[in-house]
Image (tube, rainbow, N blue to C red):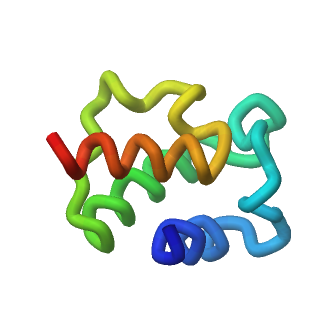
Amino acid sequence: MERLLSILQDLHDDVDYLTEEHLIDDGILDSLDIVTLVTEIDAELDVRIPPEEIVPENFNSAKALWALVERLDEA
């Protein structure tokens, strides 16, 4: 989770990713941020996120994103 938080902090260092639960809904992360996240997660965590998993529910919080990464890493 620490590596994911580091990736997120590189995008927007003024966000408290441990408590924020509406990253997409509140417009904190935009489409370019999502592309960057997907690319960085693949490069840093060696987890590929398929297009069908790129939905707001998976990106609205660091916790949801980490759950996605763990689920895909086990597959």
Q: How many marks?
A: 0
Residue furthest out toward the left: 75
Give how far across and how far down residue 9 sits, in percent.
66, 73
- Residue 16 figure quarter: bottom right
**Quarter of the rendering occupied by the C terminus:** top left
Tell whether 62 sits left or right of 17.
left
Give me the residue at 19% from left, 47% from top.
74
Give me the residue at 42% from left, 31% from top.
54
Give me the residue at 80% from left, 49% from top.
20
Give how far across and how far down residue 62 sits, in percent.
61, 53
Give how far across and how far down residue 17 sits, in percent.
73, 60
Residue 51 vs 60, above or below: the answer is above
Give how far across and how far down residue 35 sits, in percent.
44, 48
- Residue 43 figure quarter: bottom left
- Residue 21 figure quarter: top right
Q: Nearer the viewer, residue 28 or 22?
A: 22
